[in-house]
Amino acid sequence: MLRKAMILAAGRGERLRPLTDHTPKPLIRMGAYTLIEHHLLKLANSGIHEVVINLAYRGTDIEDALSSGERYGVSIQYTHEPEGALGTGGGVFAALPLLGTEPFILISADIFTDFPFNTLPAPTGLAHLVVVDNPAYHPEGDFGLTTAGLLTDTPRDYTYGNIGVLHPQLFHGCTQTQFELGPLLRHAIQQQQVTGEYYHGAWFNVGTAEELAEARQHIPIQN
Protein backbone atom coordinates (compact mmCIF):
# COMPACT_ATOMS: atom_id res chain seq x y z
CA MET A 1 0.00 0.00 0.00
CA LEU A 2 1.32 3.43 -0.94
CA ARG A 3 1.68 5.75 2.04
CA LYS A 4 3.70 8.78 0.94
CA ALA A 5 3.76 11.27 -1.91
CA MET A 6 6.08 13.98 -3.16
CA ILE A 7 4.92 17.07 -5.01
CA LEU A 8 7.46 18.87 -7.19
CA ALA A 9 6.96 22.59 -6.57
CA ALA A 10 10.37 24.19 -7.07
CA GLY A 11 9.96 25.52 -10.61
CA ARG A 12 10.09 29.16 -11.71
CA GLY A 13 7.12 29.11 -14.09
CA GLU A 14 8.90 31.22 -16.70
CA ARG A 15 6.29 30.72 -19.43
CA LEU A 16 3.55 32.06 -17.15
CA ARG A 17 5.25 35.36 -16.46
CA PRO A 18 4.27 38.00 -15.46
CA LEU A 19 1.68 36.06 -13.41
CA THR A 20 4.42 34.04 -11.71
CA ASP A 21 6.57 37.08 -10.94
CA HIS A 22 4.62 37.45 -7.70
CA THR A 23 2.74 34.14 -7.40
CA PRO A 24 4.53 30.77 -7.55
CA LYS A 25 2.81 28.50 -10.05
CA PRO A 26 1.61 25.97 -7.43
CA LEU A 27 -0.41 28.77 -5.80
CA ILE A 28 -2.28 29.76 -8.95
CA ARG A 29 -5.97 29.56 -8.18
CA MET A 30 -8.16 27.03 -9.93
CA GLY A 31 -11.65 27.70 -8.65
CA ALA A 32 -11.94 27.33 -4.88
CA TYR A 33 -8.42 25.97 -4.49
CA THR A 34 -4.91 26.48 -5.82
CA LEU A 35 -3.22 23.93 -8.07
CA ILE A 36 -1.27 22.37 -5.23
CA GLU A 37 -4.26 22.38 -2.88
CA HIS A 38 -6.20 20.27 -5.39
CA HIS A 39 -3.39 17.70 -5.24
CA LEU A 40 -3.28 17.69 -1.44
CA LEU A 41 -7.02 17.18 -1.14
CA LYS A 42 -7.02 14.39 -3.73
CA LEU A 43 -4.12 12.67 -1.98
CA ALA A 44 -5.88 12.83 1.39
CA ASN A 45 -9.07 11.45 -0.14
CA SER A 46 -6.97 8.63 -1.63
CA GLY A 47 -5.56 7.65 1.76
CA ILE A 48 -2.17 9.33 1.31
CA HIS A 49 -1.51 11.51 4.35
CA GLU A 50 2.28 12.02 4.36
CA VAL A 51 3.51 14.48 1.74
CA VAL A 52 6.92 15.95 0.93
CA ILE A 53 7.10 19.17 -1.12
CA ASN A 54 10.32 20.56 -2.58
CA LEU A 55 10.61 24.33 -2.67
CA ALA A 56 12.85 26.86 -4.39
CA TYR A 57 11.31 29.83 -6.24
CA ARG A 58 9.12 31.78 -3.78
CA GLY A 59 9.19 28.73 -1.57
CA THR A 60 8.36 30.73 1.54
CA ASP A 61 5.07 31.78 -0.09
CA ILE A 62 4.13 28.14 -0.64
CA GLU A 63 5.12 27.05 2.86
CA ASP A 64 3.24 29.97 4.41
CA ALA A 65 0.12 29.13 2.39
CA LEU A 66 0.08 25.39 3.13
CA SER A 67 1.70 25.31 6.58
CA SER A 68 1.60 21.84 8.17
CA GLY A 69 -1.06 20.59 5.75
CA GLU A 70 -3.45 19.75 8.59
CA ARG A 71 -6.41 21.57 7.06
CA TYR A 72 -6.08 19.42 3.93
CA GLY A 73 -5.90 16.16 5.88
CA VAL A 74 -2.18 15.61 5.29
CA SER A 75 1.12 16.15 7.06
CA ILE A 76 3.63 18.12 4.96
CA GLN A 77 7.40 18.12 5.19
CA TYR A 78 9.39 20.56 3.05
CA THR A 79 12.78 20.43 1.40
CA HIS A 80 14.45 23.69 0.40
CA GLU A 81 16.62 24.00 -2.70
CA PRO A 82 18.60 26.85 -4.22
CA GLU A 83 16.59 28.08 -7.19
CA GLY A 84 17.37 26.05 -10.30
CA ALA A 85 20.07 24.06 -8.53
CA LEU A 86 18.95 20.44 -8.37
CA GLY A 87 16.68 19.57 -11.30
CA THR A 88 13.80 17.12 -11.02
CA GLY A 89 15.97 14.11 -10.27
CA GLY A 90 18.20 15.92 -7.83
CA GLY A 91 15.18 17.36 -6.06
CA VAL A 92 13.65 13.93 -5.50
CA PHE A 93 17.01 12.47 -4.49
CA ALA A 94 17.42 15.17 -1.83
CA ALA A 95 14.01 14.26 -0.41
CA LEU A 96 14.63 10.50 -0.16
CA PRO A 97 15.52 10.64 3.57
CA LEU A 98 11.98 11.93 4.18
CA LEU A 99 10.33 9.52 1.76
CA GLY A 100 11.77 6.33 3.23
CA THR A 101 12.48 3.01 1.57
CA GLU A 102 9.06 2.18 0.12
CA PRO A 103 7.59 3.31 -3.24
CA PHE A 104 6.02 6.77 -3.23
CA ILE A 105 3.74 8.79 -5.49
CA LEU A 106 5.37 11.64 -7.44
CA ILE A 107 3.28 14.50 -8.83
CA SER A 108 4.19 17.81 -10.43
CA ALA A 109 2.43 20.75 -8.83
CA ASP A 110 1.70 22.39 -12.18
CA ILE A 111 -0.76 19.86 -13.60
CA PHE A 112 -4.54 19.92 -13.15
CA THR A 113 -6.27 16.57 -13.42
CA ASP A 114 -9.05 14.32 -12.21
CA PHE A 115 -6.80 11.26 -12.26
CA PRO A 116 -7.73 8.98 -9.31
CA PHE A 117 -4.54 8.71 -7.25
CA ASN A 118 -6.03 5.86 -5.22
CA THR A 119 -5.76 3.57 -8.28
CA LEU A 120 -1.98 3.91 -8.57
CA PRO A 121 -0.22 0.57 -7.99
CA ALA A 122 3.09 -0.01 -6.29
CA PRO A 123 5.56 -0.67 -9.12
CA THR A 124 6.64 -4.22 -9.84
CA GLY A 125 9.95 -2.76 -11.02
CA LEU A 126 11.48 0.65 -10.39
CA ALA A 127 8.64 2.92 -11.51
CA HIS A 128 5.06 3.12 -12.75
CA LEU A 129 4.14 6.17 -14.83
CA VAL A 130 0.88 7.66 -16.06
CA VAL A 131 1.02 8.70 -19.71
CA VAL A 132 -1.34 10.87 -21.74
CA ASP A 133 -1.87 11.71 -25.39
CA ASN A 134 0.91 13.87 -26.81
CA PRO A 135 -0.19 17.48 -26.26
CA ALA A 136 0.26 20.24 -28.81
CA TYR A 137 3.30 21.63 -26.98
CA HIS A 138 5.06 18.22 -27.03
CA PRO A 139 4.08 16.41 -30.25
CA GLU A 140 7.26 14.31 -30.28
CA GLY A 141 6.13 12.47 -27.13
CA ASP A 142 8.14 10.62 -24.50
CA PHE A 143 7.33 6.91 -24.45
CA GLY A 144 5.57 3.97 -25.99
CA LEU A 145 3.35 1.54 -24.07
CA THR A 146 3.12 -2.18 -24.79
CA THR A 147 -0.01 -4.27 -24.40
CA ALA A 148 1.72 -5.86 -21.40
CA GLY A 149 1.91 -2.45 -19.73
CA LEU A 150 5.65 -1.85 -20.12
CA LEU A 151 6.94 1.55 -21.17
CA THR A 152 9.29 1.68 -24.16
CA ASP A 153 11.58 4.30 -25.69
CA THR A 154 9.85 4.02 -29.06
CA PRO A 155 7.42 4.66 -30.61
CA ARG A 156 6.84 7.81 -28.59
CA ASP A 157 3.06 7.79 -28.81
CA TYR A 158 2.51 9.19 -25.32
CA THR A 159 3.74 11.93 -23.00
CA TYR A 160 4.62 11.47 -19.34
CA GLY A 161 1.69 12.92 -17.40
CA ASN A 162 3.82 14.01 -14.42
CA ILE A 163 2.10 11.43 -12.21
CA GLY A 164 3.89 8.27 -11.19
CA VAL A 165 5.08 5.93 -8.49
CA LEU A 166 8.82 5.59 -7.95
CA HIS A 167 10.81 3.06 -5.98
CA PRO A 168 13.75 4.66 -4.14
CA GLN A 169 16.00 2.04 -5.75
CA LEU A 170 15.57 3.98 -9.00
CA PHE A 171 18.16 6.37 -7.52
CA HIS A 172 20.69 3.70 -6.58
CA GLY A 173 24.19 4.98 -7.28
CA CYS A 174 23.12 8.63 -7.61
CA THR A 175 24.92 11.43 -5.79
CA GLN A 176 23.59 14.81 -4.72
CA THR A 177 24.18 16.89 -7.82
CA GLN A 178 21.92 18.55 -10.36
CA PHE A 179 20.25 15.98 -12.59
CA GLU A 180 16.94 15.36 -14.30
CA LEU A 181 14.60 12.45 -13.73
CA GLY A 182 14.21 11.63 -17.43
CA PRO A 183 17.56 9.88 -18.04
CA LEU A 184 17.07 7.72 -14.95
CA LEU A 185 13.66 6.64 -16.18
CA ARG A 186 14.94 5.92 -19.69
CA HIS A 187 17.71 3.74 -18.31
CA ALA A 188 15.17 1.83 -16.21
CA ILE A 189 12.87 1.50 -19.24
CA GLN A 190 15.71 -0.09 -21.21
CA GLN A 191 15.95 -2.65 -18.40
CA GLN A 192 12.17 -3.27 -18.63
CA GLN A 193 11.76 -1.95 -15.11
CA VAL A 194 9.05 0.67 -15.77
CA THR A 195 5.35 -0.04 -16.20
CA GLY A 196 2.78 2.48 -17.35
CA GLU A 197 -0.87 3.24 -17.85
CA TYR A 198 -2.64 5.47 -20.33
CA TYR A 199 -5.06 8.06 -18.95
CA HIS A 200 -7.64 9.69 -21.19
CA GLY A 201 -9.50 11.74 -18.58
CA ALA A 202 -9.08 15.42 -17.74
CA TRP A 203 -5.39 16.34 -17.66
CA PHE A 204 -3.83 19.75 -18.20
CA ASN A 205 -0.27 20.97 -18.03
CA VAL A 206 -0.54 24.54 -16.78
CA GLY A 207 2.51 26.02 -18.44
CA THR A 208 1.23 29.03 -20.37
CA ALA A 209 -1.58 31.56 -20.08
CA GLU A 210 -3.47 29.71 -22.81
CA GLU A 211 -3.13 26.36 -21.01
CA LEU A 212 -4.24 27.97 -17.76
CA ALA A 213 -7.35 29.38 -19.44
CA GLU A 214 -8.17 25.99 -20.96
CA ALA A 215 -7.77 24.22 -17.62
CA ARG A 216 -10.00 26.76 -15.87
CA GLN A 217 -12.80 25.91 -18.28
CA HIS A 218 -12.93 22.46 -16.68
CA ILE A 219 -13.38 23.62 -13.08
CA PRO A 220 -14.54 22.02 -10.87
CA ILE A 221 -12.56 18.80 -10.94
CA GLN A 222 -13.72 16.41 -8.24
CA ASN A 223 -11.19 15.96 -5.42
Image: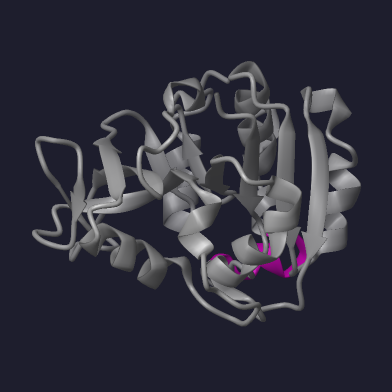
Which is more toward the observer, 164 or 173? Answer: 173
Is any part of residue 208 visible from this angle?
A: no
Residue at position x 86%, y 44% from top? Answer: 65
The percent position of residue 199, horizontal first and vertical second, equals 29, 33
User: Is the residue 25 above or below the residue 127 in the image?
Assistant: below
What's drawn in magenta, residue-wise?
Answer: 16-24
The percent position of residue 166, horizontal first and vertical second, equals 48, 48
Which is more toward the observer, 13 or 132? Answer: 132
The percent position of residue 198, horizontal first and vertical second, equals 25, 36
Which is more toward the observer, 156 or 177? Answer: 177
Residue at position x 28%, y 43% from top? Answer: 195
Could you tell whether 101 is left or right of 165 in the image? Answer: right
User: Is the residue 106 above or below the residue 171 in the image?
Assistant: above
Could you tell whether 176 is left or right of 149 in the image? Answer: right
Q: Verify whether residue 17 appears in magenta.
A: yes
Is any part of residue 220 visible from this angle?
A: yes
User: Is the residue 32 above or below the residue 183 in the image?
Assistant: above
